[in-house]
Structure formats: structure tokens, C-alpha cells
Amino acid sequence: MNLLKKIKNIYHNSPLLIKLNTLILAITVLLCATLLAFVFISYHIMVRRRNEQSVEASVERAASSLNQSYHDILQHFIRICSTVDFQTEIQLIIDAPDNVYMHRQNLQTITNDLTHSHYLISSVLIVSGSSPHYAYAPFSSPLRLPLSDLFTDDELSHIDGITWCSERSEPSKPANQVIPLVIPVEKKWGLTQIASRHDGPPSAYVILFLDSDTLQSMLVNTGLNDQQLRYHLIRRDKTLISDMTNTISRQILHTEEFHHMITKLGDSTHTVVKSQYQTQSLFLKGLETPELLLLCDLQRETYMDILASTAPSFFAALILIVALMLGTSYFMKRFVANPILKLNQIVEKIGNDDYNIPEHFPAHDELGRLLEAINSMNSTINAQKQQIKEEEAVKYRTELKLLTEQINPHFLYNTLEEIQSEVFRSNNSIAASMIQYLADYLRISLSGGADIISISNELRHINAYINIMNQRFGQTILLVHKVDPALADVKILKTILQPLVENSIRHGFGIDSFGIPASVPMIEISFTSPESGVISIDITDNGSGFDAQNVRQLMVSGPSAQSQPHVGVNNVYHRLITYYGKDNIEVSMESIPYYQNSIHIRIKNGFDFPIE
């Protein structure tokens, strides 16, 4: 017991790095075992036990891709070989088939175009229809095998329409295996058309050599992209077209199973017939070419074979994974998760100002020393919080005063000059009214140093400002205001309306811009409380309007050197967020020129601020 206790104490006080290394080692072993089991099981079950429905769908897609490629090749053939040049050359071949060099030269463009018309075509050869047969190969792919080694006279004589021939060596590259697609052509009634054996020998044979490997890759990649799948092209007379070197494919052709598959398939091109041959799964589908079939075979295993080969390894890996998971889970919970969770709880208490009695860990590793540091920092933070609050209060009041006292001196000077002018013109009543309006304006602006004023005083302040501006610029701007009864005793931050109304007068009603003056300029201000604790302020005019996106940019980011006249909107926004808090202020705006241009200010928790 004493030894176990000593080991426990040593482990308690060991560095966190050692504990983490132990954890990483356990996770590494766990991942290796999991990966080994995954790879092993995946190979036997997911790869070797292929779902027959998925293979059937792959055969459907491969057949569709082959039909599409065959269609594309024929379309390119028709486009290239329906030209006048080809028809002329066919006539020359009929007249003088033995002039091989001339025909090769004349057919260069056509053979090159055919070769490059589709990626399955490896090379092209044109053969005269009359016997003896002459071959006209392009200069870029000269014949390296005699024509007699490629096609016998008997084979050519049995060509009836477009015919797929068995796989053989490519004439220009004997090491390459190709599938000849033979298209007999004849000149009839001045046109070149595909010939039939019943009409006698054709004028010429156009032979397109399709690359066998490329064709096989296309079929495989179109389906499951699984190299265990193998595709074979077969004629309905059981002549093997592709994959001639594959022993299994030759064996399948002569089995009773394959005969039943062809019988069951019939003339259908829309179904896939399935069968089994030894350890092979067979899938047969008809193609658009009536004589052609697509056969796919897949090596399969029985369920017992898979179970017998994987069971011991699977159960061993399972036992190892369970043991490692249990050990790792206990280690993480005991030495990592619990201390970190405790630290998290302590940090949450500190965040909620609820950490009054410091706690300590029994272990003196990094987590234990971290807790001691947190305790020390918590006491320091508590000592500094009061000092920071006092400094922030001073800073807040200073910033708010600076923003509030940004009064444009030119407004005061110009108003006094206008009063002086009225006195000189003996308009004493007008001068007296302007003096009264100016007095009201300045009295409410200063407010004895208070930051907030009643809504009624804010409206009196803006009314005095509009009256002064009407007198100075000869305007007849109407002011309409509405106040929700619920806001009768509520106070708000002072002078937030004047900069916005000033923008309406100067930029909306044409004083500082070239806009068209409104026939009856009007500004409407409303104070409402749509929900508890919320003050909604709407300032609307019928002036020439504004660019809402630009004004919002000026309000949030501040004016540039070119937009100094708009400094008021930025001042209003920053005074609001300074006093009420950024999260409590929402500003939106919209503009329909000469109809309704509005700025909406929403103050949340507007009732919660003290009334001075």
C-alpha cells in the first residue's frame, strides 16, 4: 500500500508534459489499431464483397458511355466524310486504286481529322474496295504490317455495314492492341454513303482503330473505377471483340451460363442480365449497335470465406481497442479532464464575480501552479477593478462633453450678423424674435452642464433652430412633431436632433446644394415607444434625398476631408453609443427623394438611464 501511495503521489506531481505524452502514446496505439482494423475489414468486406446492385449500375453507365462514344464517332465520321473532297477522292480510288502515293497524299487531311476527332481513335486506315485491296495510310502513321496480316480478303468481303472487328495489333504500332471499326463506303448517285454487302463490293473501307486500353479505361472509370471489374465487347454470334488475351473471357463465351444470358437478354438494350460462373459474377447488357454486347465480370468471394479470414483479427483488434479506450478514458478523466473542468468552473466564477474563497489542487504540476497564478491574478484584478471604473467614468464624461460641445461657431456668428442686419433695417420685431429664438437655442444647448434633457426641451431646441434658419435663409420649413404619451417624463441625450435637421435643411432643401427646392418643405419628428424600455426616434423630410449607404458610412466611420459638412451625423452617432452603449443603438435610413427621406434611431433600454 505504501508503494502504491508513493507511485500515486509521484504521478500526481509529475509534469503535465509527461501526462500528455502518455495520453498521446495511448491515442497513437488506439489509432493504429483502429486503422489496421479498418483497412483489413474494408479490404475483405467493402472491396472484395462488392454490392451487385452497384456493379449493375456501373455496367449501365459504362454501356451508356460506350453508346455515346460510338454516336460521337459516327457524327464526326459523317461530318468529315460528307465533304466534296472526300467524294472526289472516292471516285479517284475507284478509277485508279493502285496509285497509292497519290491517294495517300490526297487523304492526309481526312485521315488526320478522323484520327483527332475522338480520343478513342488511335489511327485511321482507308482501304480500296476492289480486289486486290490497297491501303492508304497517313504519312504520320505509316503501315508497319502488311494489309494481309491485318485483314484477309474473306474478312473484308463479309463486312456488312458498320462492323466491329476482333482485337488485333495496330498497323502503325504493332505493340499496341486496337479494335477496328470498319465502315464500308460507296459512291452512289453522286453521293458517298455507307455500303451494304448485298450491293456488291464497296468503293472503299474506312477503318477506325480504337485503342483497346483506352476503351477499357473509359469503361472502368465510368463505373465503380474498380480494377477488379473487367469489361468485354462480344458480338451476338459469340465472337470476342475485345480482351482477346484474357483466358477467363474466352472460357465464359463457351459456357452454358453465357448462352442462357444471351437468350434471356434477347434484343433488349435496357436491361442487365446477371449470372454466376465459378467465382465470377457476370453482367451482360445490349448496346445500341445491334450486333454488340457488353459483358462485365467480377471476382467474388463467399460470405464464409470472408468471415473465416477476418474473424480472428477482427475480435483481437476489437478487444485491443476496447482495452485502450477504457484505459485512455480513465487517464483523461482522472488527470486531465477533471483538473481542466475545475479550472473552467473557477474561471466562470471569476467572470461572475462569485469567486470569494480561493481553491487549491492536491497536485503541484502545471495545472496546480496555473491555479495558484489564477488566484493571485484574481486578487490583483479585484484591486484594480475599482480604479479602472473610476478612470472610465472620468474618461466617459470627458468624451461626452467634448462631443456635446462641438457647436459650430459660424452658426452663432451668422445669426448675430442677421440680427444686426434686421436692426439696421429697423425690423425690430423680427430682430427681437430672432434674439428670443437664439436665447432658447443656447439655453437648451448648454442646459446648465447636464447631459440629458426632456423630450419637450429637445423639441423646443430644434424649433428654435428651424425658426432661426427660416429667418436667415428666407425659408418656410414646417416642423411637425409627435410624442408618445408614455414618453412624457422621459429624458434623452440632448441636442441629437439639431445636426440631423441641419443636414435636412442644408442638403435636402437646397441651401448648400443644387437640389430642386421642395414646394412645401416639411420636417416631421416623432418619439414613440413601440415596446417596453425602447425609445424610437424618426426624423423625416420631403427634400431632395440622400445616399443612404454613404450617409451610414459617414455616421459610423466618420467624415473624410471631402465630407466635413456632414460631421454632424457622425457626432450624433458617437454621442449616442457613448452614452447608451453600442449594443443599445440601432440606426437605419431610407430615402425616396422629394417624398420621404427618413432616419430611424432605436434606443433600447432608454428608460433605464437615470434622470438628472
Image (cartoon, rainbow, N blue to C red):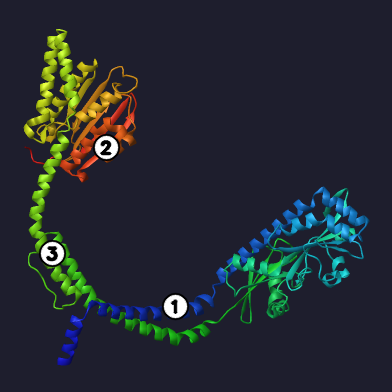
In what element is the residue under mark 2?
Answer: helix
CA separation, marks 2 and 3? 40 Å
Q: Dot 1, crowdedness within 10 Å: few (<14), some or many (≥20)? A: few
**In the image, what residue type sits under mark 3?**
Met
Q: Secondary structure at mark 1?
A: helix
Q: Quadrant of the N terminus?
A: bottom left
How dense is the environment of label 3, judged by Cα within 10 Å: few (below 14), some, or many (20 and up)? few
Q: Quadrant of residue 579?
A: top left
- Residue 603 visible to the viewer: no
Query: In the picture provided, is 174 more to the left or to the right than 323?
Result: right
Of the residues under marks 3 and 1, which one precedes in the sequence?
Answer: 1
Residue 154 visible here? yes
Give the image location of residue 420, x and y in percent. Answer: 15, 14
Residue 207 has which mark? Answer: none
Instruction: Give the mark, 2 or 1, whose residue is nearer the N terminus.
Output: 1
Residue 280 image-quadrant placement: bottom right
Q: Which residue is mark 1?
A: 38
Q: Counting residues from the N terminus, which is met first, the one under dot 2 or under dot 3?
A: 3
Name the residue that disc number 3 marks. Answer: 377
Q: Nearer the viewer, mark 2 or mark 1?
A: 2
Q: Which residue is mark 2?
A: 555
Closer to the camera: disc 3 or disc 1? 3
Q: Are marks 3 and 1 in contact (CB under 8 Å)?
A: no
- Secondary structure, mark 3, is helix
Task: Identify the amino acid type marked 1.
Answer: Phe
Q: Nearer the viewer, residue 514 or 125?
A: 514
Residue 344, horizontal then vertical, whole percent: 19, 67
